[in-house]
Image (tube, rainbow, N blue to C red):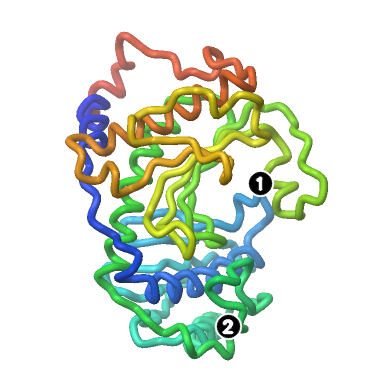
Amino acid sequence: MSSNIMDSNIRNVRFPPLPIEEWEDTKDTLHLFMQIVGKIRLGLFPKKNHWWHVPFYVSTRGLTTGPIPYKNFIFEMEFDFREHVLRIDSSGGDSRNIELEGLSVARFYKAVFSGLSELGIEASIRAVPYDVPDISTEPFETDEKHAAYDGEYAKRYWQILLQVDSIYQVFRGQFIGKSSPAHVFWHHGDLALTRFSGRPAQVREGASQVEREAYSHEVISFGFWAGDKNVREPAFYAYAAPQPEGLMEEPLRPKEAFWNPEAGMALLMYNSIREAESPGQKVLDFLESVYQAGAKRANWDIEAFRLPSYEKQPEELAARS
């Protein structure tokens, strides 16, 4: 497939409705499921810069930890939103499936660790939710309250992540500087992508260990999340850290985008663009406009970071398109 056709497909993606009121209980339960699996990856995966060893990645079936090295084999944990199971696969050929529907957080927690043990994997986590007091502070092992799972809405959430991830891949390819992968952080359940200037940054006084590592260098970061107790609909967001002076005086695209001074970021509400003629293009415009605003105000070398354009593709690539 040629790049022009691929870009056209991205621009013309279609996004399903995801009203938070109709799946909030499922969203909260799934969020806690994700934290359990995410903490296992955090504990077993070799540490990477900027906490890149902790998130999930969008897959053809749902969300995956990717391969996790363990002793003399590897294993992978994947939320499969087509079959609605958590699949644990070992390179040794064994696997375990844990049904997502009908399980409380406590039962899911026990089933996950039982499955890991049966595969010869020893893991331990701090078994309490991380920084989501609006959802739960109950230890995973005793949380019987959160047990909702609507497969249709879980599938819609994944389908949106598929589309957004594809848009992020196009956007990421336009920048030749240091960039994170597109990944899903189980802290807030947001799909994020970050660009770096390469310059160290002074982190604010009193910052946590997580924040000190995440913002050790200047960044412009982009994300999508499904909404929460305060923001009652899904949204795309973007911000610069540290925030340069005058950032919010810069224009944004598309016209539906706006700066939110209180939150310190730009927002593009999901419902404002999902039925547009080319919603994917609007998302790309939003990402690019915030990048241009942040890079301009923070004095990044925009031209040096721009992917060069080629009049002709190398023959071996052209032959495959």
Within-10-Å neighbours for mark 1: few <14, some 14–19, many 20+: some
Nearer the camera: disc 2 or disc 1 = 2
Specify the quadrant that holds the C terminus.
top left
Give the farthest residue toward the right: 205
The disc, 2 or 1, on the residue closer to the chain's N-terminal end is: 1
Residue with the most extreme top position = 311
Quarter of the rendering containing residue 218: top right
Q: Residue at x 43, y 35 (%)?
A: 258
Give the labeled residue for mark 2: 140
Determine whether 289 is above or below 97 in the image: above
Q: Position of residue 161 (x, y in %)?
A: 35, 53
Cα–Cα gap, marks 2 and 1: 26 Å
Quadrant of image for the N terminus: top left
Mark 1 residue type = His
Q: Which percent across, then down, holds residue 6?
A: 24, 32
Q: Is residue 81 above or below residue 247?
A: below
The type of residue carrying mark 2 is: Phe
State the image quarter where residue 5 is shown.
top left
Residue at 56%, 46% in the rendered image: 263
| Residue 1 shows up from this direction | no
Q: Which residue is drawn at 47% across and 45% down?
A: 223
Q: Residue 50 carries which label?
A: 1
* Residue appearing at x 36%, y 46% in the figure: 269
Residue density around tag 2, few if under 14, some if 14–19, many if 20 or more, within 10 Å: many
- Helix, strand or loop at mark 1: helix
> Where's residue 221, x and y in %?
54, 38
